[in-house]
Image (cartoon, helix red, strand yellow):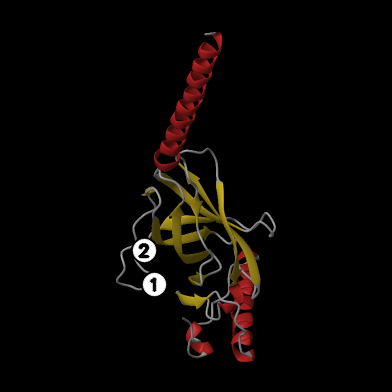
Amino acid sequence: MTATVQAGSSSLTGAGVVSVCALLFTVASFWWLNARQGRLKTWEPHAFAAIIHSSTARLRLPLVLHNTGPKPIVVQDLILTFPDEPASHLPLLWVSSPSRLQPGPDEDGKPPAGFVVPGREAQQLFIEFEAPFSGFLPEARDYQVQLQARVGHRKGWRHLLTFTLRAANIIDPDRYTVYDNAPVELTKEDQKRADAALLELLEEQEDDSAPGGRRPRRSSSDDGDAGTSR
């Protein structure tokens, strides 16, 4: 009889273990599928729009934000920083959300406002960043740029992406237009024009800060037609 009782007790213990494991699996599966907090993923943009003056710089990026988890993520703010540059380089702040990459006179850019990326979904956005004053006057070279975000479920700025901004492709900084961000080789003529245009911006900045005010700026039309950009 003792052996029978022990066998029954072992059977009950085994059934209990199976039941507990099944319950834990059900709870874990529910959490993974419905309650897990994911993260935002994004990728390097293949193009950008830019315009640069001595007093301001503006960049427009096409971004795709993917939420890897089931819970929605609230994006409160976005910012661009230059981690490898001197502290004098001001970050570029999110100033508008246009409806397209190519700037134009007929567009109506929305002011920056928080938005939601639903669970397991991706959103394509066009985000315009601006550096006030003269904190960002790029040279004709590559820059490492960080995209950071403030999200509703975390405190502080969260790193989203580090990518290469190919400022050497900005061959006509006075014109707000689209440039390729792919690692392409510029012609000697385009490189010369880009260097000359950015040098002119630097000279203008120096004139603005020198005693006696600024000298008249040469019109961009004097430099010939704008280069080809995508």
Distance from Cα at disc 1 to Cα at disc 2: 8 Å
Q: Residue at x 70, y 57 (%)?
A: 86
- What's under tag 2, amino acid-wise? Pro
Q: Residue at x 44, y 36 (%)?
A: 31
User: Residue 77, can we see it?
Assistant: yes
CB-based contact (under 8 Å), mark 1 and mark 2: yes
- Above or below residue 93? Residue 10 is above
Residue that mark 2 sits on: 98
Q: Which of these two is toward me, 211 or 48?
A: 48
User: Residue 206, can we see it?
Assistant: no
**Dot 1: what SS?**
loop
Residue 46 location (% of width, % of height):
51, 72
Q: Residue at x 54, y 77 (%)?
A: 216
Q: Residue at x 54, y 65 (%)?
A: 44
**Dot 2: what SS?**
loop
Residue 149 location (% of width, % of height):
51, 49
Q: Which of these two is toward me, 95 or 222?
A: 95
In the rendered image, which quarter is residue 27 located in?
top left
- What's under tag 1, amino acid-wise? Pro
Residue that mark 1 sits on: 103
